[in-house]
Amino acid sequence: MKTIRHGLSVGIERTGADFYLSLRISGKLTHHDYEVILPMLDSAIEGIKDPDIKALVDVTEFEGWEVRAAWDDLKLGVKHGRKFSKIAIVGNKKWQEYMSKIGSWFIAGSIEYFEDMEAALSWLDE
């Protein structure tokens, strides 16, 4: 039997003196994934005073959402969208680039799509 991996890894990384939220999304996200992930993500974001968060989101292994999970993702963007100053999305599929453009409607800061991790990190550091 083949093991199907899916979910979201959340971390805090550093380049030089800058810190950023690091997210790696893999597989097809489910509503249950969001039930587990959202409280952790909410806790991490809520703990930041005067949030001006930069985020690096790796979607190179992301395959999409179940319908209810897509709704969960939209609610996440509406709830926390004003707290992000920059989001760099690193992917490898055209639909991921389109997804980043749609995501920019719900974020107060800037979202850019990249196919190269180094270019994404450079943009975050600007």
Image (cartoon, helix red, strand yellow):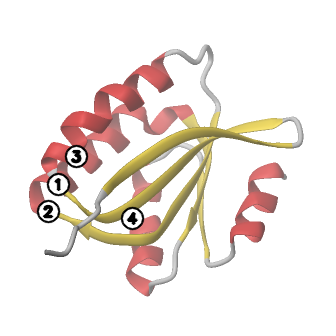
Instruction: Tell me the kind of residue under disc 1.
Output: Thr
- Labelled pair 4, 2 in contact (Cβ < 8 Å): no
Q: Is residue 77 above or below residue 63?
A: above
User: Looking at the image, which residue is at 48% across and 24% down?
Assistant: 44
- Residue to which mark 1 is pinned: 30
Q: In 3D space, how far apart are the residues under numbered discs 3 and 1 (Cα atoms)?
A: 5 Å
Label 3 belongs to which residue?
33
Give whichever of discs 2 and 1 has the lower sequence position. Answer: 1
Q: Which mark is residue 102?
A: 4
Evaluate if marks 2 and 1 touch, with contact meaning CB atoms under 8 Å apart: yes
Name the N-terminal-most of marks 3 and 2: 3
Label 1 element class: loop
Instruction: Find the distance from the CA under tag 4 to the CA under tag 1.
Output: 20 Å
Compared across the picture, whether 3 is left or right of 106 comes to: left
Which circle's residue, 3 or 4, is located before the other in the chain? Answer: 3
Marks 3 and 1 in Cβ contact (< 8 Å): yes
Q: Amino acid at mark 2?
A: Glu
| Contact (Cβ within 8 Å) of mark 3 with mark 2 | no
